[in-house]
């Protein structure tokens, strides 16, 4: 059983009846579910994942004190702590009075503010640039089992993905780095006889290419240890996972050096095709640097457009 399924069945068996029986007057204002860090919240958990932070439990979201007062919040915390310590053969960890790091009773506004700087999911363009992908994944992944008040769903919807201008700014920066590391510096490092530097250039190209591909898919890029798995599941350019993996798992000796050059150019060409498909570039060449500046030219907000091209990287 996957972690989300375990937690949902635990909530339905114990959490929801507890709320219905003990807190019917505040149930219309509550939400419950799971989201946050951990492979289980993104559906990536397996047997290996069960060695830490794997347990039945859920987050119980409370609105502000004007709706659910402190005393009621305290009683909810006590009731949550008394729920059964085992479900489906899996033990719950010992909880602090106000809940653990991943499960327990939380104030909705505080939960979202601590993770991405906003209590209501509204961010300015500048604020969007300062929130890392992993933090945005952690507040939009998982599942809601209950949201009677609708507040958590509204916030998650606001944070579902970047505004288009932010996406374009981030994409322009990644395209420029792909050009710099892969189309330019990789070959030059080899000419200098700097094979280690050439491999570093390859790694920089792969990191930037993966970020660009997630941006083209309008998906947040997960924590690096899950990035290749997530990449293989994307609707656009998932086939690049193989060439990208080859680039970082092989050396640069002999024929591999040339093979990597062609792999880099092939990935660049495929990315450019998607840029054209999305109508976000007017450059007519295979040079990713020119496409980077063309993508940036399409940003509507003049302040963001005129910032340094790497300002969002």
Image (cartoon, helix red, strand yellow):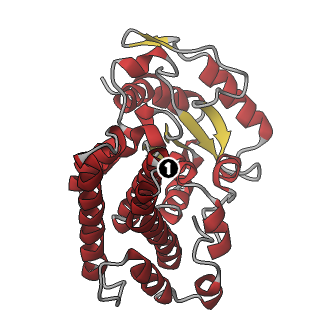
Q: Residue at x 25, y 57 (%)?
A: 263
Q: Nearer the viewer, residue 232 or 308?
A: 308
Kind of element beneath mark 1: helix
22 to 289, vertically: above or below: above
Q: Position of residue 192 (x, y in %)?
A: 47, 57
In this picture, is 159 found above or below 311? Answer: above
Name the residue tied to disc 1. 197
Q: Is residue 184 left or right of residue 260?
A: right
Q: Is residue 83 above or below residue 177?
A: above
Q: Which of 86/188 is in front?
A: 188
Mark 1 neighbour density, 10 Å: few (under 14) some (14–19) many (20 or more): some
* Residue 232 in sight in this render: no
| Number of numbered labels in the structure image | 1
Look at 68% across and 22% down and name the residue there: 78
Q: Residue at x 31, y 43 (%)?
A: 253
- Seen at 52% across and 22% down, the residue is 53
Q: Is residue 81 left or right of residue 291?
A: right
Question: Percent from the top left, x then y, of residue 240?
Answer: 25, 55
């Amino acid at each position: 059983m996957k972690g989300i399924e375990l937690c949902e069945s635990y909530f339905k068996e114990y959490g929801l009846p507890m709320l219905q029986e003990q807190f019917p007057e505040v149930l219309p204002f509550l939400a419950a579910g799971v989201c946050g860090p951990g492979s289980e919240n993104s559906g990536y958990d397996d047997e290996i994942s069960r060695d830490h932070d794997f347990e039945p439990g859920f987050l119980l979201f409370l609105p502000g004190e004007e709706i659910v007062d402190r005393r009621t919040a305290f009683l909810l915390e006590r009731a949550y702590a008394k729920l059964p310590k085992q479900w489906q053969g899996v033990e719950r960890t010992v909880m602090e009075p106000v809940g653990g790091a991943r499960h327990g009773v939380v104030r909705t506004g505080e939960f979202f503010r601590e993770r991405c700087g906003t209590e209501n999911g509204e961010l300015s363009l500048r604020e969007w640039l300062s929130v890392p992908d992993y933090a945005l994944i952690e507040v939009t992944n998982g599942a809601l089992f209950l949201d009677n008040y609708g507040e958590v769903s509204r916030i998650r919807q606001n944070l579902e993905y970047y505004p288009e201008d932010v996406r374009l700014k981030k994409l322009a920066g990644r395209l420029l780095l792909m050009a710099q590391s892969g189309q330019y510096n990789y070959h030059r490092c080899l000419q200098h006889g700097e094979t280690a530097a050439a491999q570093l250039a390859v790694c920089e190209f792969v990191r930037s290419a993966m970020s660009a591909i997630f941006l083209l898919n309008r998906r947040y890029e997960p924590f690096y240890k899950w990035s290749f798995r997530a990449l293989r599941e994307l609707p656009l350019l998932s086939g690049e996972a193989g060439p990208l993996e080859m680039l970082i798992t092989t050396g640069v000796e002999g024929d591999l050096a040339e093979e990597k050059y062609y792999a880099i150019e092939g990935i660049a060409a495929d990315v450019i095709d998607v840029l054209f498909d999305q109508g976000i570039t007017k450059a007519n060449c295979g040079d990713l640097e020119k496409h980077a500046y063309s993508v940036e030219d399409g940003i509507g907000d003049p302040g963001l457009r005129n910032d340094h091209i790497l300002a969002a990287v």
